Amino acid sequence: MKYVRLLPQVVEITKEVGQYIKNEGDNFDRKKIEKKGLNDLVSYVDRTAEEMLVEKLGKLFPEAGFVAEEGTAGGSEDKEWTWIIDPLDGTTNFLHGLPLYSVSVALAYQKKVAIGVVYEPNRDECFYAAEGKGAFLNGEHIKVSETASQNDSLLATGFPFQAFEKMPQYMQVLDDFMKTTHGLRRMGSAAIDLAWVACGRFEGFFEYNLKPWDVAAGSFIVQQAGGTVTDFEGDHNFIYGKEIIAGCPDVHADMLKTIEKRWNS
C-alpha cells in the first residue's frame, strides 16, 4: 500500500519532535505548568510539539485529518484518513523532571490504524510498525514475550487520575494481579507501556479512561509484534472505548479473565 512508504518520514518527524521536547525539558520552568482540569496538566511544550506534528504531518499527507490531544487541528477528524497524535504522552512525568515520556503518532483509515510510531527520546528508542510489515525498535524486529502464564508475567498499568467511579473494582483487579504475577509497574505513559509490551519487557498492560491518542499507535505496534489487544470485554473497541488490555496472547487471555471477573461486579 502507498501509505507504507510514509513510515520512514513519519519516524523522522516523530523523532524530531521528541528531541525538541527533550531539549526543552533540560531547562523547563515549572512555573509554566498549566491546568486543563483535575490532575490534567499541560505546558507550552505540549502545544508547540503538537503544532510541529500537525504542520509536518499535514504537509506529508494533506488528505488526512487529525485527532489530537491539544486540539491544534480542530475540526478535521471526520476524514477517512486521520492522524491520531499525542505530542507528549507522559506530560506529568515531563513536568516533574522524570525522564520517561513519549511522542505517539498513528495514521488510521476509517479508524483502523495502518501506521504507528512511538518515540521515547530519553533512551532514543523508536518503536514503529506498518500494517503487515511487523514491528521494529530502532531498526530491529521485535516480538511480544513468549511467556505462557500470568503467574510468570510482569504487568504495567496506569493509576486513575480523573475517573474514580471504578476505584473499588480497580483495586480488586490490582489485588488479584499482585498475588498472581511477578509484579505491577506504573510508568506514566500508556504509549511507552504498550511499546514495552511489543518488545517483551512487559507481558501485559491494562488501563481504563484512556483517549485514542494515548493508545492508537502503541496498540497497533503490539498487534504487529504478535500480541493481542482488546477492551475489557474482549472486544475491539479499545481505541475509542476507553478500556484496553494488551499482551502476549496467553497472558492476555489470563488478564481478560481476571478483569472480567472483577470489573462489572
Image: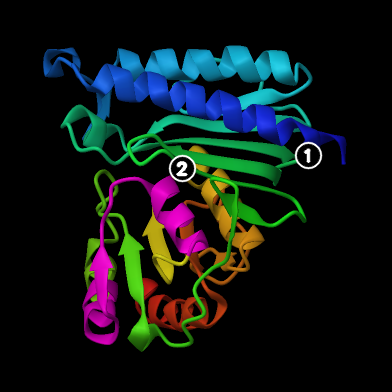
Q: Where on the picture, by quarter, is residue 55?
A: top right
Relative vertical location of residue 239 with respect to residue 121 in this rendering, above or below? below
Residue at x 46% of width, y 28% of height:
69
Residue at x 53% of width, y 70% of height:
233
Residue 47 appears at what percent x and percent y?
A: 40, 16
Task: Report the residue marked by disc 1.
Answer: 4
Quadrant, the N terminus: top right
Circle 1 packing at 10 Å, graded few (<14), some (14-19), many (20+), is: some
Q: Is residue 174 magenta?
A: yes
In this rendering, the count of numbered labels is 2
Q: Is residue 132 magenta?
A: no
Quadrant, the C terminus: bottom left
Q: Earlier in the sequence, mark 1 or mark 2?
A: 1
Q: Read off the magenta span.
A: 173-199
Task: Report the residue marked by disc 2.
Answer: 214
Residue type at numbered disc 2: Asp
Give the SS element for disc 2.
helix
